Image (cartoon, rainbow, N blue to C red):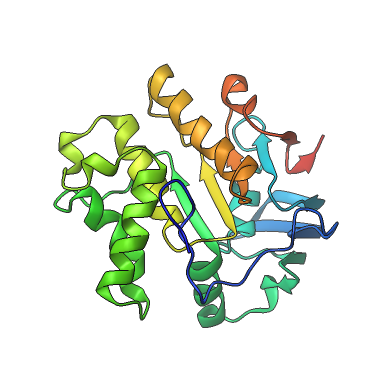
Amino acid sequence: MSGPGTVPTSPSTPRPPSANSGEPIVAIRALTKVYRQGEIEVTALNRVSLDISASEFLVLMGPSGSGKSTLLHLIAGIDRPTSGELHVQGIDITRLNESQLADWRNQNVGFVFQSFNLVPVLTAYENVELPLLLTRLGRKERRRLVETALELVGLGERMKHLPKQMSGGQEQRVAIARALVTDPSLVVADEPTGNLDAHSAHEVLSILQSLASDHGKTVIMVTHDPKAAAFGSRQIHLEKGELT
């Protein structure tokens, strides 16, 4: 059972491969994404192949338009590739229909974005609880998971605060708690420190680092900031849709 300082655990959540199993949690083969606008085609990703290990903190870097956010969105099941294979926990998610993909995403992926995407009229507790309202968990179990997630990001005393009553760094930590509350295998973060000052950014990056090193989560982060990238366990650079 989870307690303060541990990642919430939901009994229905599939478990990722062990960090020592040798099997990658994400296996990408010849992944290609082409966007079409009328007769114009733009290749955002060109036959990218990549393995990502369980408990890894992978950083995707590259200039604007390099394909790093596209790759992140494909791994997270937000977008679909034009061709190629994308296995997560042994499942080729490119073969899932829309309903299956939505269920898979809700159970396996936690999202952290540059804009915090908190509901302004809801407290920190209520914002973190939102994903759990889609489950069959009772109120008591939801409360345990929400409190554990907020304690993990150091906001146990801010549960009743509205977003406007918190700093940007605290809002992003609430967003991380919301991403963790369903106990996902993957945590994907797209420029999570882009709107934060240096101190708040360091706090957020330290939490993401701890999720991988101490709690066994696989964290994949997009950033253009070398200082932020230094928190990762591995960096990958993309240029014009290809790994460099």
Q: Position of residue 208 (x, y in %)?
A: 53, 39
Quarter of the image for the C terminus: give it: top right
Residue drawn at (59%, 56%) of the image: 186
Q: Is residue 29 left or right of residue 135?
A: right
Q: Is residue 116 left or right of residue 10?
A: left
Q: Position of residue 136 (x, y in %)?
A: 36, 81
Q: Is residue 110 above or below residue 86?
A: above
Residue drawn at (49%, 56%) of the image: 110
Question: Could you tell me if residue 21 is visible in this image?
Answer: yes
Q: Is residue 148 above or below residue 78?
A: above
Quarter-wise, where is residue 92 in the image? bottom right
Q: Is residue 136 above or below residue 197?
A: below
Q: Is residue 161 above or below residue 1?
A: above
Q: Is residue 69 left or right of residue 62?
A: left
Q: Nearer the viewer, residue 89 or 138?
A: 138
Question: Could you tell me if residue 47 is visible in this image?
Answer: no
Quarter-wise, where is residue 27 in the image? bottom right
Residue drawn at (74%, 64%) of the image: 86
Q: Nearer the viewer, residue 215 or 132?
A: 215
